[in-house]
Image (cartoon, helix red, strand yellow):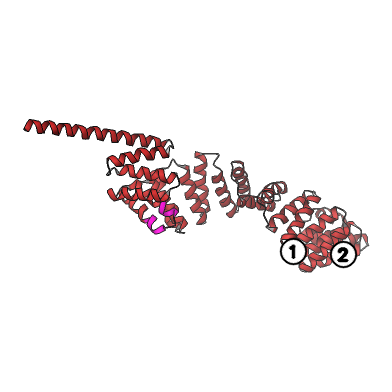
Amino acid sequence: MVKKYLVLSLVLIHVIAVKSQQTSKLFDQGLEKFRTGYYKEAIVDFTNVVERNNQYFEAYYLRGRCYMQLGKPQEALADYNRAIGMKKDYHPALLFRGIYFAQQGENRKAMDDFDAAIKSFPTFTEAYIERAALKERTNNLKEALEDYNMAIQLNNDDKMIFYNRGRINHLLKQYDANISDQDVALRKDSTFGMAYYYRAMSWQESGRLRNAINDYEKAIQYGVDNEDIFKRAGKLAFDLYRFEKAVEYYTPLITKYRTRDPEVHLNRGISHLRLKMYKQAEDDLSRAIVYDKKSAQAFMNRGIANHRLRREASAFRDFRRAIELDPGYFKTYEQRGLIYFELERYDLAVADFDMSISLRPTGDAHYHRGAIRSQRGDNVGACEDLHAARELGHPRATLEFPRLCR
């Protein structure tokens, strides 16, 4: 009898072992399908696994991952919960349940899961990264920085960790630290457009403008395409008098993003004006006026464009409107004075230069008023203006003053 029971026991052990081997094989099949992106097929295998062994927590966790990939977050959560219910410190399930909660905006639950995952596995790099991202979203930037520091200690090969730590440093106005982090990211991948983008912003904020414009160009070259980068790059190129580049960067904002920002249209219009593309300038400045009907600067510059297009009535109408909108803007009087000077309407030119100089003296206004005074035989007045123009750095006045005003 004893022999009979022993045989039955051995048979049972053999059956259990075979069943266990089959379950393990099913799990491995599901794992391979999961890794290669066959999520529906993997779910079938993992379901067979848990039907054979409902304590197989790894299968629940991986089935949850498959559900999440297929856009079924509730099913994923249920499986994460099952896995954690069987093994409370199972850090992969804690991590991905935390990611689920973060996506749902349940930040406290997400943070608890990330904390638990790190407590269970203190060298879990991914958990530090996800916790840092959550801290950033909840504006705990210094704590986020600490988590990225820890992630880098654990893994300094991942460009994304340096990139993300750099972003946090930029947000904390630690511009040199961000530049250093993006340097590392770019050494790992010289085509990483977003690293150029964030490095450019820190160059710009810290006043290193030529470095910034070079990095914006690299960022755009390597695929960064959003309104912010074109607006930043366009404004920077404009401020650096790189008008062709300003037009290049502003154009996608207008043609692709359909911006209604009057400054973008104004600056591209002024850039076209400086490039002697007067019709394009007039078009841009007219659009700037549509979006900001009180822009004295847009009216003034459109006045210049209209003058260059030989539309004198429209030009002077624009100058009058600019003065109505902002009587204290010196540039309008100066520019209208220069046009009167070109048209040899000297009395009107002098009146405008007088007003411009009373508001803010410039080399151009003094030089041209001096030229009119010289033509009229007022050598003393002419030399006073040339001296003032020279002091203000006007190049022609610097050359002519010693010759005319000994």
- The answer to whether 59 appears left or right of 226 in the picture is left
Q: Position of residue 231 (x, y in %)?
A: 64, 52
Q: Quadrant of the N terminus?
A: top left
Q: Position of residue 267 (x, y in %)?
A: 71, 54
Q: Is there any visible trace of residue 217 in the rendered image?
A: yes
The relative height of residue 182 versus residue 332 in the rendered view (above or below) is: above
Q: Is there any visible trace of residue 356 in the rendered image?
A: no
Helix, strand or loop at label 2? It is helix
Overall secondary structure of the magenta section: helix
Q: Position of residue 57 (x, y in %)?
A: 30, 44
Q: Position of residue 100 (x, y in %)?
A: 41, 51
Between residue 247 and residue 60, name the one nearer to us: 60
Three-letter code for the amino acid on which mark 1 is drawn: Lys
Q: Which mark is residue 350?
A: 2
Between residue 273 and residue 203, name the one nearer to us: 273
Badge 1 local density, few (<14 within 10 Å), some, or many (20+)?
A: some
Badge 2 local density, few (<14 within 10 Å), some, or many (20+)?
A: many
The relative height of residue 270 versus residue 58 in the rendered view (above or below) is: below
Q: CA distance from mark 1 to mark 2?
A: 29 Å
Q: Which residue in the protein does label 1 denote?
A: 293
Q: Residue at x 89, y 64 (%)?
A: 348
* 1 vs 2, front mark: 1
Q: Quadrant of residue 191?
A: top right
Helix, strand or loop at label 1? It is loop
Between residue 349 and residue 393, name the one nearer to us: 349
Magenta region: which residues? 99-111
- The answer to whether 135 appears left or right of 229 in the picture is left
Between residue 350 and residue 58, name the one nearer to us: 58
Q: Quadrant of the C terminus?
A: bottom right
